[in-house]
Image (tube, rainbow, N blue to C red):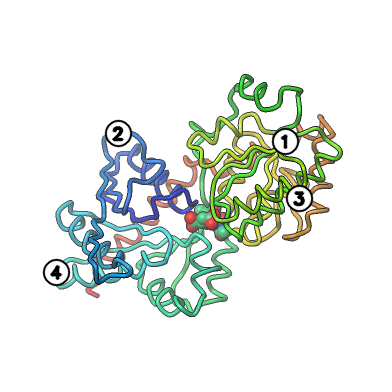
Amino acid sequence: MKIGIVCYPTYGGSGVVATELGLGLARKGHEIHFITYRRPVRLSHFEANVFYHEVDNEDYPLFEYPPYDTALASKIVDVVRYQNLDILHVHYAIPHAAVAYMAKKILLTQGRYLPVVTTLHGTDITLVGNNRAFAPVVEFSINKSDGVTAVSQNLKDETLELFDIQRNIKVIYNFIDFERFRKTDKEHFKKIIAPNGERIIAHTSNFRKVKRVEDVILIFNKILEQVPSKLLMIGDGPERQNCERLTRDLGIGDAVRFLGKQDAIEELLAICDLFVIPSESESFGLAALEAMACEVPVISSNSGGLPEVNIHGVTGFLSNPGNVDEMAEHAITLLQSEAMLSEFRANALAQARRFDIENILPHYVTFYEEILRESIYKVE
Ligand code: GMT
């Protein structure tokens, strides 16, 4: 198949999933065309079946906001026609699903039907999507997609609750590539970060409010009272400054390292004992899955789709968002018992294997085939 993929090229989870999906499909022989405003973060090397088309967003003094949607729709039309794409898969509903509908309408005037699959990732539904500023367009463009997928059962349920959706939403879970995410021997890193054999705890995110990053620091502060540990804060975003300030105010600066955005996250996860993700809302929690694939148990909130990934008392522990005391207690229990920690490490890996890209990818291929079959007779 010739598949177009539209996504945000940044460090966000939806862009990561879209890029890894495209690369995985390319390895299976499909021809993949990424259409984005910048090269996606994880599209860092040459792949034979992968093409990249940059959206040219012209600036002009009249525009306070350059019209990205218009530029993207034009680019989609151009790529679909000249590369002869079979199907377009857009990740994150805003504005991609609406833009895809616009491109589809333009292509129809040229006698071509473009089947569109939209994948809902989370905040496009739960945080921004149901905001009055976007909701009517989000609802309309989901209903107008030829196929819709959600990355967890919880996200599907929330979408059906928040919007009037007249089509089926298929749950296709996020996935992990074990070629990349696996525990490797990085003892030399460990010695640098925890020279006295301290436990290593990590958090990865885009440091947005919804991630409750300050809770990570508060939880770690409590852990530190009982277990000699180090904290790695990986990623960057609007809440980083507040977190750094809180770390200093608590006087624990020596034990916390803010590493910023990192490409080889798996190398850091390889030396970790625990991963903390206390989000207010999380449709899936790809970061937690990446940790689990590297045999790192997870202390998380129980929001959104996290309970579908992290199993309470098996792969880690879950608490209500904001319950930092309980999260810290759970973390301490785990970190103080070598036996429990190694059992949870093994369980985390076993659970992560359920989301192996090799198992999930065929679901997308079958879904595309289904949509293509149904689209043959469609005229609008
Ligand atoms: O806020 C983020 O974490 C980024 C956001 C995105 O769309 O880029 O992530 C969402 O999609 C990820 C991939 O499907 C999910 O793993 C995250 O749980 C989800 N984030 C939220 O729901 C907050």
Looking at the rendered structure, the secondary structure element under dot 4 is loop
As displayed, is residue 216 above or below residue 226?
below
In the image, which is nearer the foreground, mark 3 or mark 2? 3
Spot occupied by residue 197 in the image (x, y as percentages of width and height): 76, 24
Q: Decide if residue 172 is in sight here.
A: no
Does the residue tagged 4 have its C-beta within 8 Å of any atom of ligand 1? no
Amino acid type shown at disc 4: Gly
Q: Position of residue 191 (x, y in %)?
A: 67, 21
Mark 1 is on which residue type?
Answer: Ala
Q: Residue at x 49, y 59 (%)?
A: 121
Q: Amino acid at mark 2?
A: Phe
The image's mark for residue 46 is: 2
- Secondary structure type for disc 3: helix
Residue at the extreme right: 226
Q: Amino acid at mark 3?
A: Leu
Residue marked by disc 4: 111
* Neighbour tally class for label 2: few under 14, some 14-19, many 20 plus, Cα within 10 Å: few
Question: Mark 3 highlights which residue?
Answer: 218
